[in-house]
């Protein structure tokens, strides 16, 4: 997609600090890192959300994330993949963040607004989702 900044990075039209490249995957350092080693791993196939990417283009992404975790030596880290504006997605090309968490101040801060457990509602949801899988 010609207007997409990550597609431009893959093509080399926008420079990046490339960590890894294969037929299907590209990985580079985030330009505004949350911590040292913050990296982005993306499919070469353009799609905004996870569900827009064919399975065969997704399968190599997590192994590359793992490779980068090992190479950076991160012991604590978050792997994050945002979908949609209100879910904090700014760039509409699927990307996995690998964000080292070296201490409590740097890296990703996560809000975790837990709701009260309602087993009846959970079971209802389970049936609804399972029926569509
Ligand atoms: P999102 O909020 O969409 O999950 O994250 C997008 C990420 O892409 C942000 O962390 C941002 O710093 C990074 N980013 C945006 N534009 C560029 C760019 O041109 N180069 C690089 N290396 N990273 C970028
Ligand atoms: Zn793109």
Image: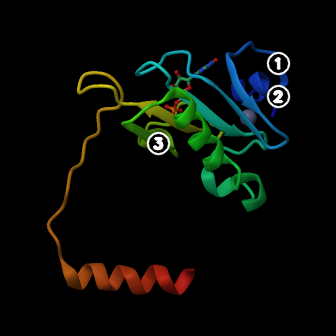
**Looking at the image, is 114 positioned above or below residue 43?**
below
Give me the C-alpha separation between circle 3 and circle 2: 27 Å
The residue positioned 74% from the left and 12% from the top of the image is 15
For the residues carrying marks 3 and 2, which lies nearer the camera in this image? 3
The answer to which of marks 3 and 2 sits earlier in the sequence is 2
Q: Nearer the viewer, residue 114 or 68?
A: 68
Q: Residue furthest left?
A: 116
Q: Secondary structure at mark 1?
A: loop
Q: Quadrant of the N terminus?
A: top right
- Mark 2 highlights which residue? 2
Q: Quadrant of residue 27?
A: top right
Give me the C-alpha separation between circle 3 and circle 1: 25 Å
In the rendered structure, the answer to whether residue 16 lies left or right of residue 33 reads: right
CA neighbours of label 1 inside 10 A, class few (<14), some (14 to 19), many (20+): few
Q: Quadrant of the C terminus?
A: bottom right
The residue positioned 53% from the left and 31% from the top of the image is 90
Q: Which mark is residue 98?
A: none
**Looking at the image, is 23 positioned above or below residue 15?**
below
Q: Are marks 3 and 2 in contact (CB under 8 Å)?
A: no
The answer to which of marks 3 and 1 sits earlier in the sequence is 1
For the residues carrying marks 3 and 1, which lies nearer the camera in this image? 3
Q: Position of residue 29 (x, y in %)?
A: 59, 21
Q: Position of residue 21 (x, y in %)?
A: 78, 32
- Mark 3 highlights which residue? 79
In the rendered structure, the answer to whether residue 89 lies left or right of residue 95 reads: left
The residue positioned 76% from the left and 52% from the top of the image is 57
Q: Position of residue 73 (x, y in %)?
A: 48, 30
- Mark 1 highlights which residue? 12
For the residues carrying marks 1 and 2, which lies nearer the camera in this image? 1
Q: Position of residue 55 (x, y in %)?
A: 73, 61
């Amino acid at each position: 997609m010609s207007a997409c900044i990550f597609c431009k990075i893959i093509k080399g039209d926008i420079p990046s600090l490339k960590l890894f490249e294969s037929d299907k995957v590209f990985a580079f350092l985030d330009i505004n890192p949350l911590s040292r080693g913050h990296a982005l791993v993306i499919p070469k196939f353009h799609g905004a959300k996870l569900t827009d990417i064919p399975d065969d283009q997704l399968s190599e992404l997590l192994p590359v994330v793992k490779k980068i975790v090992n190479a950076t030596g991160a012991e604590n880290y978050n792997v994050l993949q945002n979908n949609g504006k209100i879910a904090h997605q700014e760039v509409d090309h699927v990307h996995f963040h690998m964000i080292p968490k070296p201490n409590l101040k740097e890296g990703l801060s996560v809000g975790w607004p837990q709701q009260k457990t309602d087993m009846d509602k959970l079971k209802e949801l389970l049936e609804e989702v399972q029926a569509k899988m």
